[in-house]
Amino acid sequence: MVPKILMPKILTSFLLIILFSCSSVPENEFTINGKIRGLKNGKAVLSKLDLETNQKINVDSTQITNGIFSFSGIVQSAYLHSIFINDTLGKIHLFLDNSDIQITGSIDSLDFATITGSREDSLFHSVSLDDIFEKETGMNLMLNKNDYTFSAFVAYYQFQVNQISLDSMQLIMNGFSDEVKNSDYYRHVSSLYKKLEATASSKPAPDFTLPDVNGNDVSLSDFRGQTILLDFWASWCGPCRAQSPDLVQLQNKFKGRNFTIVGLSVDEDRNRWLKAIEDDGLNWPHLSKLDGWGEVSKQYGVMAIPQNFLINPDGIILNKNLTNEQLTKRLEQLLP
């Protein structure tokens, strides 16, 4: 699954740059002192990703002289940042807290730069990107490292991409330390939880109206009376495109049984969206405002794709994020 943060323009880029803030001003400041071998002069930009808008925010910039640069300031809660070196040469990721941080590395291998001095970053760099999304490792971090803000960062993605019950989510959130609960990541986790709770199984599917491929407004409620698979996807999402043949097979198998797939794209480029529909033979209704991660995605708590919601003829959510095998079995039960 590609999160709003883990995909070509989201997940991968997404996780590799990030961000946010809280209430009381910490007593300490952060300092970052860096030394990059093989680089004489240039510019370093400290950035983070705004989880509300999914846009990169440049926090500060500084000149690089003889490979040396420095930043200082205050973060009101620990947050994942990136330091971009001369825009295109590369970037260094660090989970920034108010510490005295030292960075050393080579311009040829910035991904392997050594970062010391930060408690939060030490934990961040002790795990791989895959670990953040892998359920068992993620659960261990959320439950056993719950005095680290990084654990709330992990929860933000774990809650999106893994099948974690609402009760377990609540248990994880309750276990975070007071400091973590005052972080921006916890605020986003709490907001996400409320959205996931509102779109859980047995809850009414929130109605919405979006343009179809012809520009006509179509509402989810227009499909009332049919069993619906609401499929969140995008043309640029590799895992989404990989499951297209399975969805085509599913649609063909059950289309005569009062069933339809409704595709909801988080694309922004109309031509790419339409081309993907044609290339993959996705012969069912498609809706999109072409505004990326817009209001409907937020309404359903969708920040990673692909995701799906199986909705009954009365508009009630039956299941979420079923695999093709699970969908086939479930539809056989519902549509004999």
Image (cartoon, grey):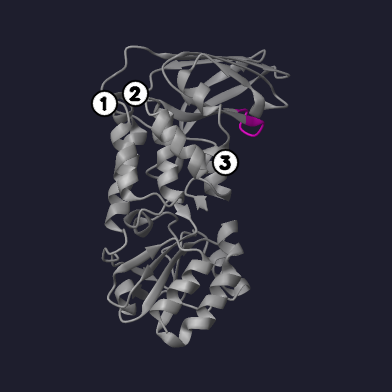
Q: Residues within 10 Å of mark 1 (few under 14, many from 20)?
A: few
Three-letter amino acid code of the residue under disc 2: Gln
Magenta stretch, overall SS: loop
Identify the residue at horizontal 26%, vertical 26% (top origin): 23
Identify the residue at horizontal 70%, vertical 27% (top origin): 109
Q: Are marks 1 and 2 in contact (CB under 8 Å)?
A: yes
> Exactly how many numbered labels are in the figure?
3
Q: Which residue is mark 2?
A: 76
In this view, 332 is above or below 97: below
Q: Are marks 3 and 1 in contact (CB under 8 Å)?
A: no
Q: Which residue is mark 1?
A: 23
- Earlier along the polypeptide chain: callout 1 or callout 2? 1
Q: Which mark is residue 130?
A: 3
Q: Position of residue 101 (x, y in %)?
A: 51, 14
Label 1 and label 2: CA atoms lie apart by 7 Å
Q: Is residue 234 left or right of residue 242?
A: left
Q: Residues within 10 Å of mark 2 (few under 14, many from 20)?
A: many
